[in-house]
Amino acid sequence: MLINGVPGDQVSVHDRGLLYGDGIFRTLRVIDGYIQYWPRHYRKLQQDCSALHITCPEAALLFKELRYLIEQRLDGVAKIIITRGEQVTRGYAAVENMIPTRILSFTPALNYPDKNYSHGVRLRLCDLRLAHQLKLAGIKHLNRLENVLAAAEWSDPDIAEGLLLDIFGNVIEGIRSNLFMVRNGELFTPNLSNCGVAGIQRERVIEWAAEHGVPCWIQQFGLAELLIADEIFLVNSVIGLWPVRELAGSEWSHHPISMQVQEWLNHAHD
Amino acid sequence: MLINGVPGDQVSVHDRGLLYGDGIFRTLRVIDGYIQYWPRHYRKLQQDCSALHITCPEAALLFKELRYLIEQRLDGVAKIIITRGEQVTRGYAAVENMIPTRILSFTPALNYPDKNYSHGVRLRLCDLRLAHQLKLAGIKHLNRLENVLAAAEWSDPDIAEGLLLDIFGNVIEGIRSNLFMVRNGELFTPNLSNCGVAGIQRERVIEWAAEHGVPCWIQQFGLAELLIADEIFLVNSVIGLWPVRELAGSEWSHHPISMQVQEWLNHAHD
Protein backbone atom coordinates (compact mmCIF):
# COMPACT_ATOMS: atom_id res chain seq x y z
CA MET A 1 0.00 0.00 0.00
CA LEU A 2 1.07 3.57 -0.52
CA ILE A 3 -0.07 6.38 1.76
CA ASN A 4 0.72 9.72 0.15
CA GLY A 5 3.34 7.92 -1.92
CA VAL A 6 5.04 6.21 1.02
CA PRO A 7 4.72 2.47 1.71
CA GLY A 8 2.72 1.89 4.88
CA ASP A 9 -0.63 0.83 6.21
CA GLN A 10 -1.51 3.46 8.79
CA VAL A 11 -3.28 6.82 8.65
CA SER A 12 -3.62 9.55 11.22
CA VAL A 13 -6.63 9.39 13.52
CA HIS A 14 -7.04 13.07 12.63
CA ASP A 15 -7.81 12.15 9.05
CA ARG A 16 -11.27 13.37 8.13
CA GLY A 17 -11.77 10.17 6.15
CA LEU A 18 -11.96 8.35 9.47
CA LEU A 19 -13.64 11.10 11.50
CA TYR A 20 -16.50 11.83 9.10
CA GLY A 21 -16.14 9.58 6.07
CA ASP A 22 -15.02 12.79 4.36
CA GLY A 23 -13.58 11.42 1.15
CA ILE A 24 -14.16 9.32 -1.94
CA PHE A 25 -12.85 6.10 -3.45
CA ARG A 26 -12.66 3.94 -6.53
CA THR A 27 -11.87 0.30 -7.23
CA LEU A 28 -10.10 -0.49 -10.48
CA ARG A 29 -9.68 -3.82 -12.22
CA VAL A 30 -6.14 -4.70 -13.22
CA ILE A 31 -5.87 -7.32 -15.98
CA ASP A 32 -2.52 -8.50 -17.31
CA GLY A 33 -0.93 -5.49 -15.65
CA TYR A 34 -3.26 -3.12 -17.50
CA ILE A 35 -5.38 -0.71 -15.41
CA GLN A 36 -8.78 -0.92 -17.01
CA TYR A 37 -10.64 2.33 -17.74
CA TRP A 38 -7.98 4.51 -16.10
CA PRO A 39 -8.95 7.75 -17.90
CA ARG A 40 -12.60 7.25 -16.98
CA HIS A 41 -11.77 6.37 -13.38
CA TYR A 42 -9.63 9.46 -13.06
CA ARG A 43 -12.34 11.64 -14.56
CA LYS A 44 -14.83 10.25 -12.04
CA LEU A 45 -12.32 10.81 -9.20
CA GLN A 46 -12.07 14.43 -10.30
CA GLN A 47 -15.85 14.83 -10.47
CA ASP A 48 -16.39 13.26 -7.05
CA CYS A 49 -13.59 15.30 -5.46
CA SER A 50 -15.02 18.41 -7.03
CA ALA A 51 -18.53 17.67 -5.69
CA LEU A 52 -17.08 17.53 -2.16
CA HIS A 53 -14.64 20.42 -2.75
CA ILE A 54 -11.66 18.15 -2.19
CA THR A 55 -8.50 18.88 -4.19
CA CYS A 56 -7.99 15.94 -6.54
CA PRO A 57 -4.38 14.71 -6.81
CA GLU A 58 -2.82 14.91 -10.29
CA ALA A 59 -3.51 12.03 -12.68
CA ALA A 60 0.19 11.50 -13.42
CA LEU A 61 1.02 11.16 -9.72
CA LEU A 62 -1.75 8.63 -9.04
CA PHE A 63 -0.94 6.67 -12.16
CA LYS A 64 2.76 6.49 -11.27
CA GLU A 65 1.91 5.27 -7.78
CA LEU A 66 -0.55 2.69 -9.09
CA ARG A 67 2.10 1.35 -11.47
CA TYR A 68 4.56 1.09 -8.59
CA LEU A 69 2.04 -0.89 -6.53
CA ILE A 70 0.95 -3.18 -9.32
CA GLU A 71 4.47 -3.95 -10.51
CA GLN A 72 4.68 -7.66 -11.33
CA ARG A 73 1.29 -8.54 -9.86
CA LEU A 74 -0.62 -8.80 -13.07
CA ASP A 75 -4.21 -9.44 -11.99
CA GLY A 76 -6.16 -7.88 -9.19
CA VAL A 77 -8.07 -4.93 -7.86
CA ALA A 78 -6.51 -1.55 -7.15
CA LYS A 79 -8.27 0.82 -4.79
CA ILE A 80 -7.80 4.57 -4.51
CA ILE A 81 -9.10 6.46 -1.50
CA ILE A 82 -8.83 10.25 -1.43
CA THR A 83 -9.79 11.95 1.84
CA ARG A 84 -9.99 15.65 2.58
CA GLY A 85 -6.90 15.23 4.76
CA GLU A 86 -5.85 15.59 8.39
CA GLN A 87 -7.27 18.22 10.66
CA VAL A 88 -6.30 18.53 14.31
CA THR A 89 -8.91 21.12 15.27
CA ARG A 90 -12.37 19.81 16.14
CA GLY A 91 -15.48 20.27 14.04
CA TYR A 92 -17.27 19.46 10.82
CA ALA A 93 -16.11 22.64 9.07
CA ALA A 94 -12.92 21.92 7.16
CA VAL A 95 -10.05 24.37 7.39
CA GLU A 96 -8.95 25.97 4.12
CA ASN A 97 -6.34 24.58 1.74
CA MET A 98 -6.27 21.12 3.21
CA ILE A 99 -3.86 18.61 1.70
CA PRO A 100 -5.82 15.51 0.70
CA THR A 101 -4.66 12.07 1.82
CA ARG A 102 -4.27 9.45 -0.91
CA ILE A 103 -4.36 5.79 -0.02
CA LEU A 104 -3.59 3.30 -2.77
CA SER A 105 -3.79 -0.44 -2.37
CA PHE A 106 -3.74 -3.57 -4.49
CA THR A 107 -5.44 -6.89 -3.81
CA PRO A 108 -5.01 -10.02 -5.95
CA ALA A 109 -8.19 -10.60 -7.96
CA LEU A 110 -11.01 -12.42 -6.28
CA ASN A 111 -12.01 -15.40 -8.35
CA TYR A 112 -15.73 -15.15 -8.78
CA PRO A 113 -17.44 -18.41 -9.81
CA ASP A 114 -17.64 -18.89 -13.58
CA LYS A 115 -21.35 -19.63 -13.27
CA ASN A 116 -21.95 -16.05 -12.10
CA TYR A 117 -21.00 -15.05 -15.65
CA SER A 118 -22.52 -17.94 -17.59
CA HIS A 119 -25.71 -18.75 -15.66
CA GLY A 120 -26.24 -15.58 -13.67
CA VAL A 121 -26.54 -14.80 -9.97
CA ARG A 122 -29.21 -14.79 -7.30
CA LEU A 123 -30.13 -11.28 -6.18
CA ARG A 124 -31.64 -10.53 -2.77
CA LEU A 125 -34.24 -7.79 -2.38
CA CYS A 126 -32.81 -5.83 0.56
CA ASP A 127 -34.96 -4.44 3.36
CA LEU A 128 -32.86 -1.32 3.61
CA ARG A 129 -34.12 1.56 1.46
CA LEU A 130 -31.69 4.15 0.11
CA ALA A 131 -32.14 7.69 1.40
CA HIS A 132 -32.44 10.65 -0.98
CA GLN A 133 -29.57 13.07 -0.65
CA LEU A 134 -29.23 15.29 -3.71
CA LYS A 135 -25.82 16.61 -2.66
CA LEU A 136 -24.32 13.12 -2.46
CA ALA A 137 -26.22 11.21 -5.16
CA GLY A 138 -23.98 9.51 -7.71
CA ILE A 139 -20.77 10.11 -5.73
CA LYS A 140 -18.66 7.17 -4.57
CA HIS A 141 -17.94 8.69 -1.15
CA LEU A 142 -16.80 7.08 2.09
CA ASN A 143 -20.20 7.30 3.83
CA ARG A 144 -21.15 3.72 3.08
CA LEU A 145 -23.15 2.58 6.10
CA GLU A 146 -26.20 1.96 3.92
CA ASN A 147 -24.18 -0.54 1.89
CA VAL A 148 -22.72 -2.09 5.05
CA LEU A 149 -26.14 -2.57 6.64
CA ALA A 150 -27.66 -3.93 3.44
CA ALA A 151 -24.77 -6.39 2.99
CA ALA A 152 -25.38 -7.64 6.54
CA GLU A 153 -28.93 -8.71 5.68
CA TRP A 154 -28.01 -12.20 4.46
CA SER A 155 -25.28 -14.78 4.85
CA ASP A 156 -26.18 -17.37 2.18
CA PRO A 157 -23.07 -17.42 -0.05
CA ASP A 158 -25.21 -18.47 -3.01
CA ILE A 159 -26.76 -14.96 -3.07
CA ALA A 160 -24.19 -12.85 -4.85
CA GLU A 161 -25.65 -9.38 -4.51
CA GLY A 162 -28.40 -7.31 -2.88
CA LEU A 163 -30.91 -5.11 -4.71
CA LEU A 164 -31.50 -1.66 -3.23
CA LEU A 165 -34.69 0.33 -3.69
CA ASP A 166 -35.03 3.92 -2.52
CA ILE A 167 -37.42 5.14 0.19
CA PHE A 168 -40.15 5.53 -2.45
CA GLY A 169 -39.74 2.01 -3.81
CA ASN A 170 -37.83 2.89 -6.97
CA VAL A 171 -35.22 0.39 -8.10
CA ILE A 172 -31.77 2.00 -7.75
CA GLU A 173 -28.80 -0.38 -7.83
CA GLY A 174 -27.03 -3.37 -6.35
CA ILE A 175 -25.04 -2.90 -3.13
CA ARG A 176 -21.83 -2.82 -5.15
CA SER A 177 -23.09 -2.72 -8.73
CA ASN A 178 -25.31 -0.86 -11.16
CA LEU A 179 -28.37 -2.52 -12.62
CA PHE A 180 -29.91 -2.75 -16.08
CA MET A 181 -33.10 -4.41 -17.24
CA VAL A 182 -33.91 -5.51 -20.78
CA ARG A 183 -37.45 -5.22 -22.11
CA ASN A 184 -38.45 -5.79 -25.73
CA GLY A 185 -34.86 -5.39 -26.82
CA GLU A 186 -34.40 -2.04 -25.02
CA LEU A 187 -32.26 -1.25 -21.98
CA PHE A 188 -33.43 0.55 -18.85
CA THR A 189 -31.25 1.68 -15.96
CA PRO A 190 -32.32 3.68 -12.89
CA ASN A 191 -32.00 7.43 -12.68
CA LEU A 192 -29.38 8.11 -9.98
CA SER A 193 -30.07 11.78 -9.36
CA ASN A 194 -31.45 11.19 -5.85
CA CYS A 195 -29.25 8.35 -4.60
CA GLY A 196 -26.95 5.58 -5.76
CA VAL A 197 -23.46 5.49 -7.22
CA ALA A 198 -22.98 6.12 -10.93
CA GLY A 199 -20.23 3.72 -11.92
CA ILE A 200 -17.83 3.50 -14.83
CA GLN A 201 -19.19 0.20 -16.09
CA ARG A 202 -22.70 1.70 -16.21
CA GLU A 203 -21.31 4.39 -18.53
CA ARG A 204 -19.76 1.68 -20.68
CA VAL A 205 -23.05 -0.19 -21.04
CA ILE A 206 -24.84 3.03 -22.01
CA GLU A 207 -22.18 3.47 -24.69
CA TRP A 208 -22.59 -0.12 -25.86
CA ALA A 209 -26.27 0.61 -26.40
CA ALA A 210 -25.50 3.78 -28.35
CA GLU A 211 -22.93 2.00 -30.51
CA HIS A 212 -25.32 -0.86 -31.27
CA GLY A 213 -28.43 1.21 -31.90
CA VAL A 214 -30.17 -0.20 -28.83
CA PRO A 215 -32.36 2.32 -27.01
CA CYS A 216 -31.20 2.81 -23.41
CA TRP A 217 -33.52 4.65 -21.04
CA ILE A 218 -32.31 6.24 -17.81
CA GLN A 219 -35.47 6.51 -15.77
CA GLN A 220 -37.38 5.57 -12.62
CA PHE A 221 -38.98 2.16 -12.36
CA GLY A 222 -40.25 -0.02 -9.55
CA LEU A 223 -39.85 -3.61 -8.47
CA ALA A 224 -43.02 -4.76 -10.28
CA GLU A 225 -41.59 -3.58 -13.60
CA LEU A 226 -38.23 -5.14 -12.86
CA LEU A 227 -39.76 -8.53 -12.12
CA ILE A 228 -41.40 -8.72 -15.54
CA ALA A 229 -38.24 -7.70 -17.39
CA ASP A 230 -36.93 -10.04 -20.08
CA GLU A 231 -33.45 -9.88 -18.54
CA ILE A 232 -31.69 -8.18 -15.66
CA PHE A 233 -27.95 -7.72 -15.33
CA LEU A 234 -25.51 -6.15 -12.88
CA VAL A 235 -22.25 -4.39 -13.70
CA ASN A 236 -19.30 -2.89 -11.95
CA SER A 237 -15.66 -2.20 -12.74
CA VAL A 238 -14.39 -5.21 -10.83
CA ILE A 239 -16.88 -7.97 -11.59
CA GLY A 240 -17.69 -6.94 -15.15
CA LEU A 241 -21.23 -8.17 -15.91
CA TRP A 242 -23.38 -10.76 -14.16
CA PRO A 243 -26.82 -11.68 -15.47
CA VAL A 244 -29.47 -12.16 -12.75
CA ARG A 245 -31.06 -15.59 -12.63
CA GLU A 246 -33.27 -15.16 -9.55
CA LEU A 247 -34.86 -12.28 -7.65
CA ALA A 248 -37.77 -12.36 -5.20
CA GLY A 249 -39.12 -15.67 -6.52
CA SER A 250 -38.83 -14.78 -10.21
CA GLU A 251 -36.33 -16.62 -12.39
CA TRP A 252 -34.56 -15.94 -15.65
CA SER A 253 -32.74 -18.63 -17.59
CA HIS A 254 -32.00 -16.88 -20.90
CA HIS A 255 -29.82 -13.81 -21.06
CA PRO A 256 -29.10 -13.20 -24.75
CA ILE A 257 -28.63 -9.43 -24.60
CA SER A 258 -26.79 -9.58 -21.26
CA MET A 259 -24.37 -11.99 -22.89
CA GLN A 260 -23.81 -9.71 -25.87
CA VAL A 261 -22.99 -6.83 -23.55
CA GLN A 262 -20.77 -9.05 -21.38
CA GLU A 263 -18.84 -10.19 -24.43
CA TRP A 264 -18.36 -6.62 -25.60
CA LEU A 265 -17.23 -5.43 -22.16
CA ASN A 266 -14.71 -8.25 -22.01
CA HIS A 267 -13.13 -7.34 -25.31
CA ALA A 268 -13.67 -3.67 -25.94
CA HIS A 269 -10.75 -1.60 -24.69
CA ASP A 270 -11.04 1.98 -23.64
CA MET B 1 -4.69 9.73 22.41
CA LEU B 2 -5.23 6.07 23.05
CA ILE B 3 -5.86 3.59 20.26
CA ASN B 4 -7.11 0.31 21.74
CA GLY B 5 -5.51 1.36 25.02
CA VAL B 6 -2.12 2.18 23.53
CA PRO B 7 -0.82 5.76 23.14
CA GLY B 8 -0.62 6.65 19.47
CA ASP B 9 -2.26 8.60 16.70
CA GLN B 10 -2.47 6.15 13.79
CA VAL B 11 -5.00 3.56 12.71
CA SER B 12 -4.82 0.86 10.09
CA VAL B 13 -6.00 1.75 6.60
CA HIS B 14 -7.93 -1.53 6.81
CA ASP B 15 -10.11 -0.08 9.55
CA ARG B 16 -13.72 -0.06 8.43
CA GLY B 17 -14.14 3.29 10.17
CA LEU B 18 -11.99 4.77 7.41
CA LEU B 19 -13.15 2.52 4.56
CA TYR B 20 -16.91 2.96 5.08
CA GLY B 21 -17.48 5.25 8.07
CA ASP B 22 -18.47 2.00 9.77
CA GLY B 23 -18.54 3.13 13.38
CA ILE B 24 -19.93 5.57 15.91
CA PHE B 25 -18.63 8.34 18.17
CA ARG B 26 -19.39 10.59 21.09
CA THR B 27 -17.97 13.85 22.41
CA LEU B 28 -17.99 14.32 26.18
CA ARG B 29 -17.51 17.48 28.19
CA VAL B 30 -14.92 17.28 30.94
CA ILE B 31 -15.31 19.92 33.69
CA ASP B 32 -12.95 20.09 36.64
CA GLY B 33 -11.78 16.59 35.80
CA TYR B 34 -15.34 15.26 35.93
CA ILE B 35 -16.69 13.46 32.83
CA GLN B 36 -20.18 14.89 32.48
CA TYR B 37 -23.05 12.46 31.84
CA TRP B 38 -20.77 9.43 31.61
CA PRO B 39 -23.48 6.83 32.35
CA ARG B 40 -25.75 8.36 29.71
CA HIS B 41 -22.97 8.62 27.18
CA TYR B 42 -22.08 5.00 27.72
CA ARG B 43 -25.71 3.92 27.40
CA LYS B 44 -25.95 5.80 24.10
CA LEU B 45 -22.67 4.24 22.92
CA GLN B 46 -24.18 0.84 23.64
CA GLN B 47 -27.40 1.68 21.81
CA ASP B 48 -25.57 3.02 18.77
CA CYS B 49 -23.17 0.06 18.66
CA SER B 50 -26.11 -2.28 18.98
CA ALA B 51 -27.97 -0.58 16.11
CA LEU B 52 -24.97 -1.23 13.85
CA HIS B 53 -24.24 -4.67 15.36
CA ILE B 54 -20.84 -3.52 16.62
CA THR B 55 -19.57 -5.04 19.87
CA CYS B 56 -19.45 -2.21 22.40
CA PRO B 57 -16.33 -2.16 24.62
CA GLU B 58 -16.94 -2.54 28.36
CA ALA B 59 -17.81 0.61 30.30
CA ALA B 60 -15.08 0.02 32.90
CA LEU B 61 -12.41 -0.25 30.19
CA LEU B 62 -13.47 2.94 28.41
CA PHE B 63 -13.80 4.82 31.69
CA LYS B 64 -10.33 3.76 32.85
CA GLU B 65 -8.83 4.85 29.53
CA LEU B 66 -10.66 8.18 29.61
CA ARG B 67 -9.36 8.84 33.13
CA TYR B 68 -5.82 8.04 31.97
CA LEU B 69 -6.15 10.51 29.08
CA ILE B 70 -7.73 13.28 31.10
CA GLU B 71 -5.27 12.98 34.00
CA GLN B 72 -4.38 16.48 35.15
CA ARG B 73 -6.05 18.23 32.23
CA LEU B 74 -9.15 19.38 34.00
CA ASP B 75 -11.26 21.04 31.31
CA GLY B 76 -11.87 19.94 27.80
CA VAL B 77 -13.62 17.64 25.40
CA ALA B 78 -13.08 13.90 25.29
CA LYS B 79 -14.00 12.00 22.16
CA ILE B 80 -14.67 8.29 21.82
CA ILE B 81 -14.76 6.64 18.39
CA ILE B 82 -15.72 2.97 18.13
CA THR B 83 -15.33 1.38 14.71
CA ARG B 84 -16.28 -2.13 13.64
CA GLY B 85 -12.55 -2.89 13.41
CA GLU B 86 -9.98 -3.89 10.82
CA GLN B 87 -10.75 -6.14 7.91
CA VAL B 88 -8.21 -7.07 5.27
CA THR B 89 -10.62 -8.80 2.88
CA ARG B 90 -12.51 -6.56 0.46
CA GLY B 91 -16.21 -5.80 0.60
CA TYR B 92 -19.06 -4.18 2.51
CA ALA B 93 -20.03 -7.38 4.32
CA ALA B 94 -18.23 -7.54 7.65
CA VAL B 95 -16.61 -10.79 8.71
CA GLU B 96 -17.91 -12.34 11.94
CA ASN B 97 -16.63 -11.64 15.43
CA MET B 98 -14.71 -8.51 14.51
CA ILE B 99 -12.78 -6.78 17.27
CA PRO B 100 -13.86 -3.14 17.38
CA THR B 101 -11.29 -0.36 17.33
CA ARG B 102 -11.54 2.24 20.10
CA ILE B 103 -10.00 5.65 19.62
CA LEU B 104 -10.03 8.00 22.60
CA SER B 105 -8.80 11.56 22.49
CA PHE B 106 -8.85 14.68 24.62
CA THR B 107 -8.82 18.30 23.46
CA PRO B 108 -8.58 21.31 25.77
CA ALA B 109 -11.96 23.04 25.93
CA LEU B 110 -12.78 25.49 23.20
CA ASN B 111 -13.69 28.81 24.73
CA TYR B 112 -16.97 29.79 23.15
CA PRO B 113 -17.83 33.50 23.45
CA ASP B 114 -19.77 34.37 26.63
CA LYS B 115 -22.33 36.20 24.51
CA ASN B 116 -23.34 32.90 22.88
CA TYR B 117 -24.73 31.96 26.29
CA SER B 118 -26.04 35.34 27.43
CA HIS B 119 -27.32 36.94 24.21
CA GLY B 120 -27.70 33.94 21.96
CA VAL B 121 -26.31 32.98 18.58
CA ARG B 122 -27.05 33.57 14.93
CA LEU B 123 -28.31 30.45 13.17
CA ARG B 124 -28.00 29.90 9.42
CA LEU B 125 -30.73 28.12 7.50
CA CYS B 126 -28.71 25.55 5.55
CA ASP B 127 -29.42 24.68 1.93
CA LEU B 128 -28.60 21.02 2.51
CA ARG B 129 -31.62 18.90 3.45
CA LEU B 130 -31.20 15.81 5.60
CA ALA B 131 -32.03 12.49 3.96
CA HIS B 132 -34.43 10.00 5.56
CA GLN B 133 -32.72 6.78 6.54
CA LEU B 134 -34.74 4.86 9.14
CA LYS B 135 -31.90 2.45 9.87
CA LEU B 136 -29.50 5.25 10.78
CA ALA B 137 -31.79 7.90 12.28
CA GLY B 138 -30.78 9.02 15.76
CA ILE B 139 -27.40 7.25 15.67
CA LYS B 140 -24.19 9.26 16.03
CA HIS B 141 -22.34 7.31 13.36
CA LEU B 142 -19.26 8.16 11.33
CA ASN B 143 -21.14 8.88 8.08
CA ARG B 144 -21.15 12.62 8.53
CA LEU B 145 -20.82 14.04 5.03
CA GLU B 146 -24.18 15.81 5.37
CA ASN B 147 -22.83 17.70 8.37
CA VAL B 148 -19.55 18.42 6.58
CA LEU B 149 -21.30 19.81 3.50
CA ALA B 150 -23.73 21.88 5.58
CA ALA B 151 -20.89 23.31 7.67
CA ALA B 152 -19.14 24.35 4.44
CA GLU B 153 -22.07 26.57 3.43
CA TRP B 154 -20.86 29.68 5.27
CA SER B 155 -17.66 31.25 6.59
CA ASP B 156 -18.94 34.21 8.64
CA PRO B 157 -17.61 33.45 12.15
CA ASP B 158 -20.50 35.39 13.67
CA ILE B 159 -22.86 32.58 12.60
CA ALA B 160 -22.42 29.92 15.25
CA GLU B 161 -24.50 27.09 13.88
CA GLY B 162 -26.50 25.85 10.90
CA LEU B 163 -30.15 24.74 10.96
CA LEU B 164 -30.95 21.54 9.08
CA LEU B 165 -34.34 20.71 7.64
CA ASP B 166 -35.15 17.32 6.15
CA ILE B 167 -36.05 16.65 2.51
CA PHE B 168 -39.71 17.40 3.31
CA GLY B 169 -38.98 20.73 5.00
CA ASN B 170 -39.36 19.57 8.60
CA VAL B 171 -37.06 21.23 11.13
CA ILE B 172 -34.64 18.58 12.45
CA GLU B 173 -31.56 19.90 14.27
CA GLY B 174 -28.44 22.03 14.20
CA ILE B 175 -25.36 20.67 12.42
CA ARG B 176 -23.85 19.72 15.80
CA SER B 177 -26.73 20.38 18.20
CA ASN B 178 -30.35 19.53 18.96
CA LEU B 179 -33.01 22.20 18.76
CA PHE B 180 -35.96 23.22 20.93
CA MET B 181 -38.55 25.91 20.44
CA VAL B 182 -40.69 27.51 23.14
CA ARG B 183 -44.28 28.48 22.42
CA ASN B 184 -46.77 29.65 25.04
CA GLY B 185 -44.61 28.23 27.80
CA GLU B 186 -44.36 24.78 26.20
CA LEU B 187 -41.34 23.07 24.62
CA PHE B 188 -41.22 21.46 21.19
CA THR B 189 -38.36 19.46 19.74
CA PRO B 190 -38.26 17.63 16.41
CA ASN B 191 -39.08 13.96 16.04
CA LEU B 192 -35.82 12.25 15.02
CA SER B 193 -37.20 8.93 13.83
CA ASN B 194 -36.31 9.62 10.17
CA CYS B 195 -33.02 11.49 10.49
CA GLY B 196 -30.91 13.51 12.91
CA VAL B 197 -28.85 12.61 15.98
CA ALA B 198 -30.59 12.20 19.33
CA GLY B 199 -28.12 13.70 21.80
CA ILE B 200 -27.64 13.37 25.54
CA GLN B 201 -28.35 17.03 26.23
CA ARG B 202 -31.66 16.75 24.37
CA GLU B 203 -32.63 13.97 26.81
CA ARG B 204 -31.64 16.22 29.70
CA VAL B 205 -33.85 19.06 28.47
CA ILE B 206 -36.78 16.69 28.07
CA GLU B 207 -36.19 15.66 31.70
CA TRP B 208 -35.99 19.28 32.81
CA ALA B 209 -39.43 19.81 31.31
CA ALA B 210 -40.84 16.74 33.07
CA GLU B 211 -39.34 17.79 36.40
CA HIS B 212 -40.73 21.30 36.08
CA GLY B 213 -44.19 20.40 34.83
CA VAL B 214 -43.53 22.02 31.44
CA PRO B 215 -45.14 20.18 28.53
CA CYS B 216 -42.52 19.04 26.01
CA TRP B 217 -43.72 17.78 22.63
CA ILE B 218 -41.59 15.64 20.36
CA GLN B 219 -43.13 16.21 16.96
CA GLN B 220 -42.76 17.41 13.40
CA PHE B 221 -42.80 21.12 12.65
CA GLY B 222 -41.70 23.33 9.81
CA LEU B 223 -39.68 26.50 9.41
CA ALA B 224 -42.77 28.75 9.44
CA GLU B 225 -43.71 27.49 12.90
CA LEU B 226 -40.15 27.82 14.14
CA LEU B 227 -39.91 31.44 13.01
CA ILE B 228 -42.94 32.44 15.11
CA ALA B 229 -41.67 30.64 18.24
CA ASP B 230 -41.29 32.68 21.42
CA GLU B 231 -37.78 31.29 21.89
CA ILE B 232 -35.42 28.86 20.17
CA PHE B 233 -32.43 27.22 21.77
CA LEU B 234 -29.71 24.75 20.80
CA VAL B 235 -28.10 22.14 23.01
CA ASN B 236 -25.31 19.62 22.91
CA SER B 237 -23.03 17.90 25.40
CA VAL B 238 -20.09 20.15 24.70
CA ILE B 239 -21.59 23.62 24.30
CA GLY B 240 -24.40 23.22 26.83
CA LEU B 241 -27.21 25.58 25.76
CA TRP B 242 -27.21 28.53 23.40
CA PRO B 243 -30.34 30.60 22.83
CA VAL B 244 -30.90 31.66 19.21
CA ARG B 245 -31.03 35.40 18.58
CA GLU B 246 -31.32 35.41 14.80
CA LEU B 247 -32.52 33.04 12.09
CA ALA B 248 -33.56 33.80 8.51
CA GLY B 249 -34.26 37.49 9.24
CA SER B 250 -36.22 36.87 12.47
CA GLU B 251 -34.76 38.02 15.77
CA TRP B 252 -35.25 37.10 19.42
CA SER B 253 -33.95 39.23 22.27
CA HIS B 254 -35.63 37.65 25.29
CA HIS B 255 -34.93 34.08 26.27
CA PRO B 256 -36.46 33.58 29.74
CA ILE B 257 -37.20 29.87 29.49
CA SER B 258 -33.98 29.12 27.62
CA MET B 259 -32.12 30.79 30.48
CA GLN B 260 -33.92 28.72 33.09
CA VAL B 261 -32.99 25.52 31.26
CA GLN B 262 -29.40 26.72 30.76
CA GLU B 263 -29.07 27.47 34.47
CA TRP B 264 -30.44 24.07 35.38
CA LEU B 265 -28.13 22.26 32.90
CA ASN B 266 -25.16 24.13 34.36
CA HIS B 267 -25.88 23.04 37.90
CA ALA B 268 -27.82 19.79 37.80
CA HIS B 269 -25.50 16.80 38.04
CA ASP B 270 -26.33 13.42 36.68
Image: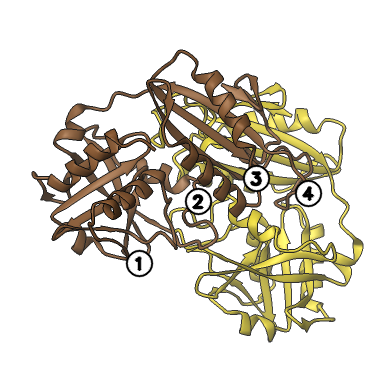
Chain colours: A brown, B yellow
Residue B103 drawn at (x, y percent): 65, 32
**Quick one: label 1 or label 4, which is nearer the N terminus?**
4
Q: Is residue B16 above or below residue A179?
A: above
* Pointer 3 residue: B26
Q: Amino acid at mark 2?
A: Ile
| Residue topped by disc 1 | A168
Comes first in the chain, label 4 or label 2 = 4
**Chain of the residue under the numbered disc 4 shown in the image:** A
Distance from the alpha carbon under mark 4 to that under mark 3: 25 Å
Tag shown at residue B2 = none
Label 4: which secondary element: loop
Label 3: few (<14), some (14–19) or many (≥20) C-alpha neighbours in 10 Å: some
Q: Amino acid at mark 3?
A: Arg
> In the rendered view, does A147 fall on the left or right side of B204?
left
State the quadrant of the C terminus of chain A.
top left
> Which secondary structure, mark 2?
loop
**Chain where mark 3 sits:** B
Q: CA distance from mark 4 to mark 2?
A: 22 Å
Expressed as whole percent of the image width and height from the top left, the position of residue B6 reads 69, 21
Q: Earlier in the sequence, mark 1 or mark 2?
A: 2
Instruction: Tell me, yes or no, whether dots 1 and 3 are on the same chain.
Output: no
- CA gap between label 2 and label 3 equals 27 Å
Mark 2 or 3, closer to the camera: 2
> Mark 1–mark 2 contact, CB under 8 Å?
no
* Residue contact between numbered discs 1 and 3, judged by CB atoms under 8 Å: no
Q: CA distance from mark 1 to mark 4?
A: 38 Å
Q: How many C-alpha atoms fall within 10 Å of the one at disc 1: few (<14), some, or many (≥20)?
A: few
Residue with the mark numbered 4: A96
Identify the amino acid type marked 1. Phe
Between label 1 and label 3, give the one nearer the viewer: 1
Residue bearing mark 2: A139
Q: Nearer the viewer, mark 4 or mark 3?
A: 4
